[in-house]
Each structure stands twice: as C-alpha cells, then as structure tokens.
Amino acid sequence: MDYSELIFTCSDSEAWQRDLLINDLANIGFDTFEEIDVGFKAYIASAALDIAAVERLLLNLPDNFSITYTVRPIEPKNWNAVWESNFEPIAVLGRCYVRATFHESKPNYEYEIIIDPKMAFGTGHHQTTSLMMEYLLDSNLQRKRVLDMGCGTGILAILAAKIGAQEITAIDYDPICCTSVKENTELNQVNSIKIYCGSKEVIPNELYDIILANINRNILLDQLGKYAEVIKPHGSLFLSGFYDGDDLAQIVDASHSFGFKYISKKLQDNWVAAKLEKY
C-alpha cells in the first residue's frame, strides 16, 4: 500500500493544540504519528488522503496557533517497527504496568497489561488513556458489566477484566482496532470481552454498570443519549478525549438532559477525564 507523509511544523508552545490536531487527524484516517523537533509527522494511505479535509481542520484552529505542512509520497515502511521504536513501557499509579510483547515482564505490579498496538490507538501513553486507567484503578469493578466505547487496542477493557469486571463489551468503528482487541485479549488471557465493530448502533440492548468512552467531544455529545439508554440507575459514565474548560462544560451541560450528574474530573496537561453518574 502506498503511503503519504505530511510534515506539520508548529510551535512547541502550542503542545495542547498540537495534540488536539493529531486527534482530529486520526479521525479522518491518519493512522501513525511521529514527533519531531519542529512538530510532528502524520502518515496515511495515499488513497485515503483528503487534502480538503486537512485544510478544513486547519481553518478551525485558533488564530494564535501557527502551523504549516508539506506532503510527500514515501517508500513502503514497516509500520509495526515504527510503533515499536516509539513504544516504551509505562506505569499507572504505581499499580498497573503496560508493556509490549518485546518488553521484559514486571510481575511485582498489581496488574500487568501486554499491548501489541500495531495500527490501533490506545497504549496508555496518551494522557486521556492514562487518566481513564486511573479512574478504573480507583473503582470497584467486581462482577460489574462494562461497556468500552472507542476501545482502540482494548487496553481499558483488558484492565477492567483484570480488576474484576464480570463481562465487558468493547466497540470500535475501525476493523483494525477490533482485530487488535482480539489479539490483545488473547495476549492477556482474558476471556470476558465481547468485541463489536461499529459505533453506537451496534451497542447491545443490555444494561451496564459502567460505561467508558475515550473518543472526542463531538462524538461523545452525539452518543450521550444512547449511553443513557443502556446504563443502569446510579451507573458510572467515564468520559475522556477532550480538554478541560469549554469542552468539559459542553459535555456536562448536555449530559444533564439525559439524566447524568457530574461527579469529578482528573487532569493532565489540560486533557481531562470526567466521571458522571446516572440518576
């Protein structure tokens, strides 16, 4: 498959805006990113490259965020090797150790998760993923039924299973992610995760104690109503994939009309994860 490389040059002082742009680029088909001194590189299958869509994203950036980019076709590349070269193990709250298959095990941690990321997102390195993991580690999941929306590699679903959730449903619209979840559940020897490929339309007609959704603001706003339909009374809704401030305010305001109340938030580098409860 032919790939294109876009080199984005931007200011280091706008790191949070750069992260948001990377998230938006992922939503329009870019599947691999690499940080460089002046900004970052983004890769996409050439057949899927839509320059007009990229330009629309840039037009919506704040006026104080200066960014330019260049496009060039590239030679075939071993994308799994790119992932491996950028994937270092991490520890969350000193309790959960996340590593790849090529890293040494650390059995002294309470939980160890093995992730083979491939092209899927969610290795625990992004602030939103680690914040969601912190919430899970702080929660009682024993015998709970959990829904993980936008599951990526399945890292949150796998952690929920290891903590004690009875049954987990993991959903992602990207077939690559769904395949990645299946492989990662086998690596971690958890068998309580059901995997569905799609969006809110494939959520089973069941009730969940806990819903996890690490996606982005606009998709969350669109899906809040569906979450309200499938969560138990007093169930917990954990959300991330957006920023503190206006993003969080919009989501909290919208959630009230679906019977949710805001409980708390966790912050890291202006990214936020929030806990809501159904009443």
Image: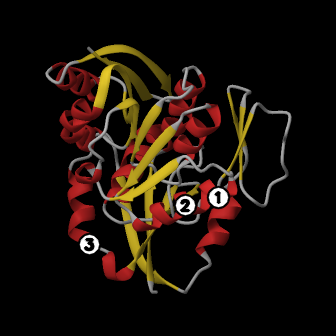
* Residue for point 38% across, 57% down: 196
Q: The C terminus appears in which quarter of the rendering?
A: top left
Judging by the rendered image, the residue that carries numbered circle 1 is 186
Distance CA(mark 2)–CA(mark 3): 30 Å
Q: Residues within 10 Å of mark 2 (few under 14, many from 20)?
A: some
Distance CA(mark 2)–CA(mark 1): 6 Å
* Residue for point 53% across, 41% down: 156
* Residue for point 34% across, 48% down: 66
Image mark for residue 182 = 2
Image mark for residue 50 = 3
Distance CA(mark 3)–CA(mark 1): 36 Å
Residue 142 or residue 261, whichever sits in front = 142
Disc on the earlier residue, 3 or 1: 3
> Would you say the residues marked 2 and 1 are in contact, meaning their CB atoms lie under 8 Å apart?
yes
Q: Kindly tell me whether residue 6 is visible in this rendering.
A: yes
Residue 241 or residue 189, whichever sits in front = 189
SS under mark 2: helix
Query: Which of pointers 2 and 3 indicates the residue nearer the eye?
Result: 2
Disc on the earlier residue, 2 or 3: 3
